[in-house]
Structure formats: C-alpha cells, structure tokens
Amino acid sequence: MNRKYRKTVIAGNWKMNKLPSEVKPFADELKTLVPKQKWCDVVICAPFVDLPAAVKAFRDAKVGVGAENLNENEKGAFTGEVSANMLTDLGVKYVIIGHSERRQYYGETDFSVNAKVHTALEAGLNPIVCVGESLEQREKGITLELIALQVKTALSGVSADKMRRVIIAYEPIWAIGTGKTATAEQANEVCSAIRGVIRDIYGARVARSVTIQYGGSMNEKNAAELLAQPDIDGGLIGGASLVPEKFAAIINAANQD
C-alpha cells in the first residue's frame, strides 16, 4: 500500500450469497468489530436483491455499497438486467465489472467490459474493473501481456479525470475460490505491471493515484502480507467477506500503521 498517493479499498464480493434478511445482522456485527476505518475505505458489493437492505444497513457507517454487475444500456428491452441509473437511484456507489465468473459463465468480453466502464462512469458510479489470467496462461508465460491487453481495452476512451474514479482488481482466475493464492511477490509483480500500463496511457501522476486491488483468495491469514506490498492497495474479497470476523480481520490488516 502507498497511502501517500492513493486510497486503500477493501471490497467484499458476496456473489450469489446472503438473503436480504441476512444483511442487517451482518452489518450490525461488522460495525461492532470495525467501529472505524483509520486508513481504508470499505465496500460491500451485494446481489441486486440485497442492495436496498445494504444501503439502509450501512447508512450510518463508512461502508460504501456496490453492485456486482450492470447493463451497459441506459434502459430498454433487456429482461432481467439492471441499469446504472437504477443502481444510483438506490444509493449504490460502486459496481464490479468484468469479474472472471461473468466472463466465464456469461460471455462477457474485454469490449463489453469497456462499454460497462463508460456506462458506470457516466452515471457517477465507481467501477471496480477485474482482470486476470488462467493457470494455463500463467504457465505459458503470457500473464503480463494478457493483463496489459485487458487493462488497455477496459480503459479505452476513459479520460484521465474519470480514471481517478476507477479501481482495478487483479484476480488470477486460478486463485479465485480455490484456496490458492499468488505469493505476495507474484501479486505485486502484476499489480505493478498494471500501474505501468496506466502510466503509459495517462502519465505518472494518474498512475500513482489509481487503487489496484488483489482479489485471488485474499483472507484474514494472508491479508497483511499481501497488503504490505507497495502496489497492492486493497482487496476484492470473496468467501472471507461473508463472515464478519474474517472480513473485519482483513479490514484491520489494511488499517495497520
């Protein structure tokens, strides 16, 4: 982390977990475990049906609420989809875009990710843009080239002033939900490379300001080591974000001096 230049952000991605009735008990417990965030911003990204309950439950806490996806169109005949304006009208501040599970199961591409990034920014949302490689791609030695392509495509046409609202989440696909984690050095190498791509596009000042998270099975046991790396500015947390004690431990790791 480098707090001098950029925010540390710990975001939970609940995926398809938790009923609306479970949101308030979770929020109440988390608020007792983490009464204040000294250094980092905290975000809960919840399923669509949980968002109204989450906005209400975290209203009196410094916890932002995010969605897990959005449609790139403003409105229209898109059955089952949710627009950016629907999210902002609820009080949602963040949205995850391009998670590997969306790419794998629902056919999202780098180009659809780019369209969604523009839609989110136009609506005033803060996008958390996910990039990452498969195990096969890592073993072939093309990780950095692939990640660079994903980042460049996702950010195509995004202005420098809007770029300051974008968070990049590096999520090696082989480490999501598997219990496997990139070493701190491996994770930082890719996060540093991502910052280099942003520097090439926008210059050093913007690159220094962008929050880059690590999201491959970060948990309460490895968070401190990962967050000690200079180019890892937070985490996009899956399973550990479902348990208040575990999520609080990660937040506390980010709050350490």
Image: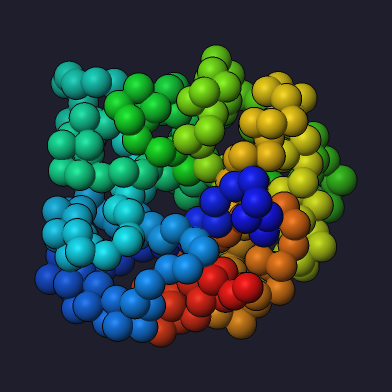
Q: Residue visible at 14% across and 53% down?
A: 52
- Quick check: 235 left or right of 70? right
Q: How is the image coloured?
A: rainbow
Q: Residue visible at 47% across and 35% down?
A: 165
Coordinates of residue 12 in the picture (x, y in percent): 42, 62
Q: Is residue 135 visible?
A: no
Coordinates of residue 63 in the picture (x, y in percent): 33, 60
Camera-nearest residue between 108 and 208: 208
The residue most toward the top is 157
Coordinates of residue 118 in the picture (x, y in percent): 43, 22
Q: Residue visible at 51% across and 76% down?
A: 252
Coordinates of residue 181 in the picture (x, y in percent): 68, 68
Camera-nearest residue between 141 and 186: 186
- Quick check: 53 left or right of 9? left
The relative height of residue 249 versus residue 10 in the rendered view (above or below) is: below
Number of callouts in the render? Answer: 0
Q: Is residue 117 visible?
A: yes
